[in-house]
Amino acid sequence: MRHEARVTELAEPFAMSLTAVSKHIRVLERARLVRRRRVWREHLVSFRPEPLDEVAHWVEKTRAFWNARLDALEELLQAEDAAEAQSANSSATRKKKRKLRKKGSSR
């Protein structure tokens, strides 16, 4: 809805009173998503997309921030896992070498 529409037009497809529709429109006005103006007895409402653009920008910025943080955390955890695996392998290798030395010296 880029053009202005009367509140009665907006209410038409819904099974609710004009008072209920007006309350919903007031909520949208407080969120700055619509603008209402009066021309004599008619209330005209128009859509304002700017607040949604602001939200979309914030969501994208926040998504980029957290994706970068989570990627860094994933890299850190993978590096820790690799270091633990390498440490376990070298520890097992040292144990095998000790066993071999003991066998060789006991002969």
Image: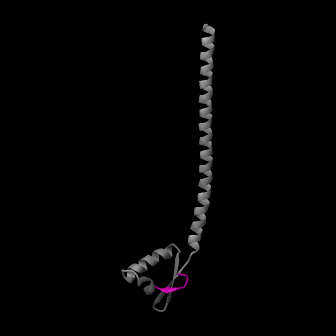
Q: Position of residue 3 (x, y in %)?
A: 55, 85
Pick the residue in front: 96 or 4: 96
Overall secondary structure of the magenta section: loop
Location of residue 24 (image quadrant): bottom left
Lateral position of residue 7 relative to residue 74, left or right: left
Location of residue 105 (image quadrant): top right
Q: Position of residue 63 (x, y in %)?
A: 59, 58
Give the residue at x 62% y 61%. Answer: 61
Q: Quadrant of the C terminus?
A: top right
Lateral position of residue 22 relative to residue 87, left or right: left
Location of residue 58 (image quadrant): bottom right
Pick the residue in front: 70 or 95: 95
Q: Which residues are drawn in magenta? A: 1-6
Q: Is residue 104 magenta?
A: no
Give the residue at x 61% y 16%. Answer: 100
From this view, report whether residue 37 is shown above or below residue 79.
below
Give the residue at x 60% y 41%. Answer: 78
Q: Is residue 2 magenta?
A: yes
Give the residue at x 42% y 83%. Answer: 11
Q: Position of residue 104 (x, y in %)?
A: 63, 11
